[in-house]
Structure formats: C-alpha cells, structure tokens
Image (spheres, rainbow, N blue to C red):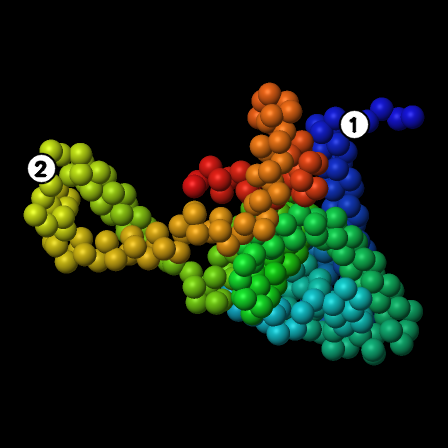
Amino acid sequence: MPTPRSPRQEAARRAGNDVHAGRRLALAVEALGESLDANPALPAAFAPHANALAHGRSTVPADGERTDFPARVMARVEAPHVDEPDLPAMARDLEAWLGADLTRWLADDVARLVCDAAGEAVRDAVETAWEARADIVDRKRALAEVYGRWYAEGLGDRERAVFLAASRLALEEACDRWCALGCEGSLDRYVSTWQRAAAGWAEKALGTAVDVAVTDVTRLRALQTAAKEIRAEREAPRSLPRALAARMGVEVAEVDRLLRLEAVVRDRLDPAALLRRRWALVKPIAAAVSTLERELGRMPSVTEIAARAGVHDALVELVLEALGDD
C-alpha cells in the first residue's frame, strides 16, 4: 500500500501537474502557429503573428492589455460558456492567444479552410490547442468555483449569474496568462488573485461597486485617526464635524463629505453583514474549527479543517480571513 503524501508533497505534485498541463498548451499553440504559417490561405497581415506563435513568442493577451472586464462579464452572462463548442467557437476560445482579427478570420472561414490538407492541419491544430486549454482550465475549475460561490452567496439570481460569469472569465484569463508567462510560480495563487479581481468586475457590472479615489483613502484614514483622538479626550466637542475639520485643517463641508463616504463604505463592506449573507458557507467551517480545537488541543490547519468540513481548502482560507476581519 503506497505511503500517503503529506500536504506539502501533494501540493508539489499538483504544481508539477499544472506545469505539465501549461507546457502542453504552450506547445499546442506553437503547433497551431506552425499550421497557420504554412497555410497559403492565411492573409499576409496575419503572417507575422502566426510566425510568432510558431516560434513560441506568444503574448497574452495578444491584442494588448484590456480593461473592459465588466462589459465582457455581461457578454458572458448573455452568452454562457459552452463546454463542447463547435470549431468556430473553439477558435474564439483561443482569442487571448490569436488576437481578435485572426480569431475572427479563423471562425468565419473555418468551413472553407478544411477543404484541403493545409486547412485540415489548421482544424486539427485548433482542436488540439482548445483541448489543451480546456484541460488546464478544468484543473482549476473547482478552485474558481469556491471564489465564485463565496462572492455570490446570498444574492439574487441575476447578481449570482454575474458573479459566476466573472469567476469563469477570470479563471480563463489566469490560465492563459500563466501559461504565456512560462508557467512560472503557483497557478493556484495566480487563479486566486484573478478571482478576487473578478468580484470587482461583477460589482462594477452590476453598478454596486464602491469606488474610492486614492486621495480619499488617505483622507478617510486621517478622518478616522482624528475621530479616535477626539473621542479619547476628556470633554466631548459640541460639534464633531467642526472638531474634525479643525483637527484636520479642512472645511466642515469636506468633513461632511468624508463622513458620508465612510458610511457608504462601512455599509457595503460591513464584515458582520457579509458573514451573515454567507452563513451557509461559514457555519460548517466554524463548527469544524471548534470541534477540532477541542480534539487536538490546538488550532487545526487549513487542510484539517477542510477535511473535517468536507470543503475546498480555499473556502476555509476565505472564511478564516472573513472571521479575522470581523
């Protein structure tokens, strides 16, 4: 009977498998570039990009950095991802690597392309690259779904659909970019970072995001510091806004504005309210922590808590983070 792996060994094994899957995608994209480069039907305008793909010089996103994530999330909501697409849809799934124009040409002309041997080679290469990309995305689907459910828990159907669409889009972005960067570092950490960004895209798409300017972040901190100092003094001021304005060296109107902004931020990001909304996810983990502490006589590890609660490690980390903020 094989010796069970330690959590560290299991993590190393998974990381090695991620790198293998990432390199498989990179090689498949190179093969796609080679088939395009060799196809006489390829328009001359796309030849430099096809040659770059063929020689492992992929840049993701191919068209340069994009900032329209909220709009793309809503487009995904209206046209959900299909796990078994046709060939044009496969080409569109590879847009991060191919770029919008080359993708459009492939998707529009794929029926004509497959009429000869060169076209068949392109078709086979598209299918192979799509399958390699689907494989690495599927490897991290469970991790992304943890974040998607965490941010969507307790929301209405429409809001939930937007958060889940954002989660899926972020998963694909993370996998494509990680592979294009040479599969360096932890893919799990990369996916998690993009999942947190996805929550912001969803809020902007829904119009519920609280955007605080960098200058206001500094002023809010100064406001909180001044309020703490004033409340610590023996005699309470007749007017807190006037006292804050004098302490901060600003107009009373500015203090009033900052107080209103602080109230909005506090209402939207109240840790206690967020925990109540997500209590269905929090409760089994909190119970597992309490039980394991009594049994072990120490704070259990994330892996131990996840095993007892029957959940993903990432969900335990999110819950513990939220409880620590409360």
The answer to which of marks 2 and 1 sits earlier in the sequence is 1
- Give the number of marks: 2
In the rendered structure, the answer to whether residue 8 lies left or right of residue 286 reads right
In the rendered structure, the answer to whether residue 208 lies left or right of residue 115 reads left
The answer to whether residue 249 is above or below residue 85 is above
Label 1 sits on what residue type? Arg
Q: Is residue 44 visible?
A: no
- What residue would you read off at disc 1? 5
Label 1 crowd (10 A; few <14 / some 14-19 / many >=20): few
Residue 300: image location, x then y, percent: 61, 28
Structural distance between the alpha carbons of marks 2 and 1: 63 Å
* Quadrant position of residue 183: top right
Element under disc 1:
loop
Residue 78: image location, x then y, percent: 62, 74
At horizontal 15% and vertical 39% (from top left) the residue drawn is 230
Label 2 sits on what residue type? Glu
Residue 138: image location, x then y, percent: 75, 53
* Quadrant position of residue 236: top left
Residue 277: image location, x then y, percent: 50, 54
Q: Is residue 271 visible?
A: yes
Residue 53: give its label.
none
At horizontal 59% and vertical 33% (from top left) the residue drawn is 289
Residue 235: give its label.
2
At horizontal 43% and vertical 41% (from top left) the residue drawn is 326
Q: Nearer the viewer, residue 34 or 153?
A: 153
Judge depth for marks 2 and 1 and give the one in front: 2
